[in-house]
Image (cartoon, rainbow, N blue to C red):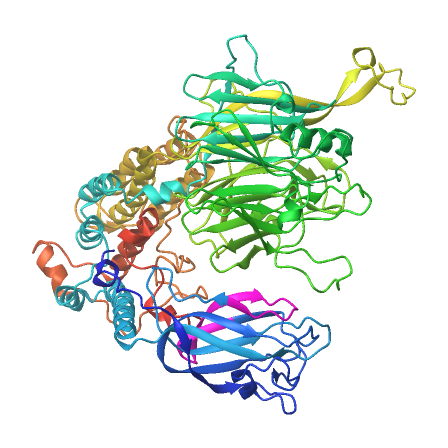
Amino acid sequence: MSATWATSSQPTMPPAQTMTYTIAGCSEHSGNYVPENILVDSPQDPSSRWSGAQQLPTAKQWILLKLETLGVVKSITFGKFNRKHPCNMREFRVYVGLNPHHMVQALYTQLKDDTVSETFPLKHVNGEGICFPTRYIKIVPVSAHGMSFNISIWYVSVSGIADSLYVDNIRSRYEEYRETVVLRHVLKHLRQRRLLTPYQNILARSNIQVEHPVVTALYSSLVLQGAWTDSEALLSEASSAGLLDAYIQFCQPHSQWKRLHGMNADGDAPSKRGGHAMALNPDNGLIYLFGGWDGQKSLDDFWSYDVNAERWHVISHSTSVEKNGPIARSCHKMVYDTKSGCIYLLGRLGDGDLKPEDHQELLRRAGEIPDGSRSTPYCSEFYRYHTRGLDAGKWDLLSFDTASSGGPPLIFDHQMVMDCEAQILYVSGGRVVDGEWDSPKYSGMYSYNVRTSKWKLLQPQPALSMSSSVQPPISPRFGHSMVLDPISHNLFIFAGQRDDKYLSDMYAYDIASNTVTELFSNFSTSGGPNACFTQRAIIDGRLKEIYVFCGLTRAQPACALTSLRADTPNWVYQYAHPSKPGKWTNILPEVIQEGGEPAEVPLPRYAHQVVYDEGTKRVFMHGGNAGEVNEPVEDVETEVEGSGDDERPNRVSKEMRLDDFWTMKLLRAAPDEIIRRAKYQIRQQQFREMCEEQPAVKALRFLQTQVSAMVDHTNPEETSVFRALLGHLFSTPIATDDGSAESAGTPKETTINLLEEPPKKRSRPNTPDEAWTSRLDDEDETLDASTSSAVTSSGQKRRHAVLLMEEDPVETALRDASTKPLSPDRFRQRTEVFESLLQFIAEDGKQPIGSLLDMVDAEDGI
């Protein structure tokens, strides 16, 4: 919600400077290695360090620093000894805060075991984008570079902003933010406890909003007045205001595939292949495709596909014969730069494992070496192709060997993305091509600055001689996925293969701070895909979603055989913040209407390629390897596998490569579907109240018609809840037509009609698989603590014994004089229905998540 702390302009940031601090405390130290030693940078003095008294993980060790003045801490620097040392701290965490008892993690990373000082940015902005001040810094070592050694820290310097005017402004804004958060939780608490008069008084005397005005109207209509029709009408207003959009985004999506049959003027299209590369120009809808492996040879043809015209165009039948053009290859990567209109190409796996003469011919065509000279094999050339401007249609050989200029060695099955705004290209992992296939090597993470033409190693891989305990933040791999969130400037790196192991881990790499956060050590156990190799991934940064199209998986966790699942498992990963684990959801197949033809969908595959148009929300997928298929021996010229005694026709196994081209859109629940589900909740409560206040026959008729009309009878959970409502009718004393109460009892034949003859089955496309239940009057019921404080975090129902929960004067003014006040139980029921409806509302349009009472126990508090 809008607030002064969120809308006021940010103050101009002064330059950072070194900040003075003292030692405020530490865990037990070893000998004379006192914490004050870290105040002095003496790399030649072996005693100028702090060293823990015990070896981890036997005891938690820490140093607490207190800044001389309050400030905005921006970075921390660690000095080192003049040579490698086994006690050098490797992995560590840094916490910051206004007091030592309430701190948040600002950094989690590693130090290199070398002699060069390292500086790391520190988190100084919270999740709402509010800059916060710091007084205390806590350094928590996790491990040393040497096994069974005490951890040592040699020197620490802190940099930030100490300007009093700036810091006072930051602190004022931060306190205002904290005050707003507290007040919104207090207001939520008061309304839940039926203290509506103080609720209104605080609102009138403050400059904050608890929720969107439509949601406030829904509360008054549903909880205070029981105006059911008005409440349902407000749901449509909420949809028109965009309050349901976030919930719709998190509903389980369905895929809608369409095969594309476009060709060029000669009736041609790219042939069957896998391991090719594709890149998309989002400005004009052109998709570029280059190379690959067709099962017999590597390819060097270059194509473009016009999405609008639905036609292929061959740019070059063979780039090998063009000046500076790349030779045939597969397992390479290609990215498109929207600023310059250039395509960058790196990596390869070529025929014959890249013979030296290939490189000689490459350099001769580039004019870099004379005829007869020799070149070094396994060099990693780096190309640029111009799609517009004076050089349109031309190739540049940017580097014959990127390793010689500080870049990656020759690799394949790596990943490459482009930050077009920053003009920086990122390359991750990949298997090194050096001719030694029995001892695999892997590449690290590099960046390439287009403006300066410089490579930089960001995350190295350990040498084989290093201790196995020294692992980099992101373990070596190839055939993995990497995508760039251009808004948060984070890279997501996950899955792939290392040696003979398929991986299911996931990391977020913060480009600005050069730090890595492990999101999942095994996302398969967190509702995600199986460990996978050569899967493909794309990202929509605006929606904060990653779409994963899985490739090869292991048949079983300990099985060496790979397999392709027949149901083509594709996934969407949704995240609120890059450094926090998100939610994995399986993308369901398209919903087929009753009596409709099954939809055409792609075969399962690996080594395929996908690109994504963020503007149209469309995925494009081409080719790949569909795995082994059996063909009659007479159809292929290859050696026959041994046949058994069953006299079956001799058949051989052959990999099937594909040339099909597809586009896909995700279908999600329509707003009308969400409104239906919300109305189902409201009408359930309306029915429960009718059971207590009106004749049984009238309540039953309402259940059969009005409630039933809101049920998706194809959904077993919704149907089960609907049938259970009848039991509520029988167990509740109900008013008769003459005003007296009697035990509920409906004619037997009516009951049979209700239970055995439900309304006709209705097809509701795009219905999410979540279902709501609303047995709100059961004593053993539990609610989600994030939407109601009727239960504690431990699941125990709160009785509110301190409060009477009687009618508030605000309610008295709203109801008619002839209407009875709500009982405490009725108020609680309606409140719980209202808060269950809030799950459909976006976070910025509703009361804060969580309860005031549970905030007391929160680890990070506000």
State how many labels appear. Answer: 0
Tell me where residue 555 sits by quadrant: top right
Depth check: 524 or 718 in front? 524
The N terminus: image quadrant? bottom left
**Residue 90 place in picture, x, y as percent:** 63, 70
Residue 5 visible in rendering: yes
Whether the magenta-drawn stretch holds residue 596 is answered as no
Q: Residue furthest right?
A: 645
**Residue 760 place in picture, x, y as percent:** 39, 26
- Rendered view: 48 above or below 812: below
User: Is residue 818 shown left or right of residue 298?
Assistant: left
**Residue 668 place in picture, x, y as percent:** 40, 35
Depth check: 339 or 591 in front? 339
The C terminus: image quadrant? bottom left
Depth check: 688 or 321 in front? 321
Q: Residue furthest front?
A: 370
The residue lying at 8 percent from left, 53 percent from top is 816
Region of the chain picked out in magenta, as a range: 94-119
User: Is residue 696 shown left or right of residue 326?
Assistant: left
The residue lying at 62 percent from left, 29 percent from top is 276
Whether the magenta-drawn stretch holds residue 110 is answered as yes
Residue 504 visible in rendering: no
Tell me where residue 556 sits by quadrant: top right
